[in-house]
Amino acid sequence: MKRKDVVVNIAETLKEAAKEKIDQVGLIEAKTGRIVTFSKLDLLSDGYAAYLKNEGIYAGDTVILMVAPSAEFICLTFALFKLGTPVILIDPGMGYKNLLTCIERVRPKILIGMPKALLFKKVFPQPFQTVSKTFCCGKSFGLFGRDIRKCISPTIQPFPLFKPTGEDLAAIIFTTGSTGPPKGVRYEHSVFVAQLRLIRDYFGIGADDIDQPAFPLFALFSTALGACSIIPDMDPTRPSRVDPEKFVASIQKHKVTYSFGSPAIWNVVSKYCIEKNLVLQSMRKVLMAGAPVPYDLLKRVKAILPNDASIFTPYGATESLPIASISGNEVLSETWTESKTGKGTCVGKALPGLEIKILEISDDPVPDYKKETELAPYHIGEIVVKGDVVTRSYENNRSETLLAKIKDGEEFWHRMGDVGYLDDQCRLWFCGRKSHRVQMINRTLYTIPCESIINEHPDVYRTALVGCSWNNDEYQTPVIIVEPHKKKKLDRGKLIREVKKIAASSELTSEVSSFLIHESFPVDIRHNAKIFREKLALWAQKKLFSQV
């Protein structure tokens, strides 16, 4: 399919689900107990679309949606799809400065938000100067106008769907900023269509499933697939702080069959289940993504699922998702023995319709694809991908678009910003972020292979390899920072001595001589799993300088 071809509006999937599952439950809010059928979800989204059109909102108008995970979030998003108005989604946990920068860059015309979002606009008006209309979703006691939930006509008619081409914009979804400044990724309707097809066909998720997503955006996919979604009672910006008792009780009550979440949330939930001797009998699939999944976590999650359940650890990014995947069983029985010796993390083979290549590493823009820069199997290089789920550009950010895309005839490749290699079975092995590699005078170290060596110590929770430079030297000194498991008593000196001994025993880490302990690593806000190595590098630099 060419991107200029007419494609199905994503909102059509909700209409189909409403016809096929008229009175079946489409969404449950675990916190409030509210139940909404598929037909009601479709009806409400029609009502919102009609109201917004009457208020002068038209196809092409960009709308920033600042509403918490809920039935309203789902209905309003589909209403905007029906209108043909691109919806802007920004993670609120990225911090107010990043949030304001993102809003100013994307220049929205319309704001639909909760009262606190509209208050945020009043306190920081400058980034919202392009917003010509605002709509309140929630009780504001008259402070921000009428609640949009009460503006829907009592006689709702089916809303005529906007007919997009594959090039028409459906959404702008921001990256978290965990691997650089947050960027607005332009999602065309064709990308959403391709993603749905992959999720349905490869992972076997469909209308008979019940989802409890720890990542709110996945609820949109489930609704589009005709699967019931349980909105969990949790703060989606802090998955590591989930209340496992509530999360598990909701799975059991609603007989949830699958869930997508970060390793951070399943670390908490799996520990709780093992402590309580619980098996999640209804669960058939768990998808964990956002960061490499440790061996111990995979073992724990496998232990709390039925024997016939599956675990997947898909690989991708906001710009291209999903790209590759591997089953938990394959990791546990085969690839982990390689990972723990410093071979990287195997994330599986490219999904159907996608291509993965490994190129020579470059930090500069690469305007055209050159086959001679491709690397042979087992050689670490830069990961690039091509396929229908790969987005084309960033919103109002030409320099980042030029840096991230490589033209290849009429097609293009996306540079993942990661390094890794392909093995002789065409499986991709992830070795870390390109920007996190440590360039010494005689060699280059990559984060994931080196860290996995030290992570084998029983008192180590996780580690971070960072590079420090003296007087802006172009070469770096490698430093390994250790976050220990939480214990009442820790002999820090003993731990450092033992970690140094482990490092010296491996060719990968034998040249690392600086080791530090950090009690709690800074992590990303979306998954609470990606380590902010840039912040740790600055911290390490100060610590080491203070010792000089």
Image: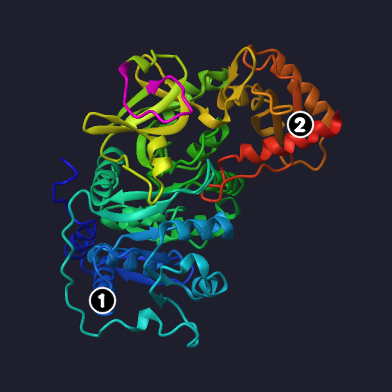
**Side of 475 relative to 294 (left or right):** right
**Residue under numbered circle 2:** 516
Between disc 1 and disc 2, whose residue precedes? 1
Q: Secondary structure at mark 2?
A: strand
The three-letter amino acid code for the residue at tag 1 is Gly
Quadrant of the rendered structure where residue 452 is?
top right
**Circle 1 SS class:** helix
**Image height of 245 relative to 310, above or below:** below
Residue 47 numbered mark, or none: 1
| Residue at screen point 18% across, 56% down | 164
Identify the main secondary structure in magenta.
loop
401 or 71: nearer the viewer = 401
Marks 1,2: beta carbons within 8 A: no
Give the percent coordinates (x, y) of residue 394: 38, 47
Q: Residue sitting at 49 percent across and 68 percent down? A: 31
Give the spatial CA distance, label 1 vs label 2. 57 Å
Which residue sits furthest left? 6
Residue 140 coordinates in the image, percent (x, y): 49, 83
Locate the C terminus and report the quarter of the image it occupies. Answer: top right
Quadrant of the image occupied by residue 149: bottom left
Left or right, 369 with respect to 444, comes to left
The part of the chain drawn in magenta is 358-371
- Rendered view: 52 above or below 304: below
| Residue at position x 46%, y 24% in the image | 362
Q: Is residue 154 magenta?
A: no
Check if residue 367 falls in the magenta segment: yes
| Numbered-mark total | 2
Residue 94, given in percent of the width and then of the height, sits at 55, 54
Q: What amino acid is labelled 2 in the image?
A: Leu
Q: Relative to the observer, which residue lies in front, 435 or 350?
A: 435
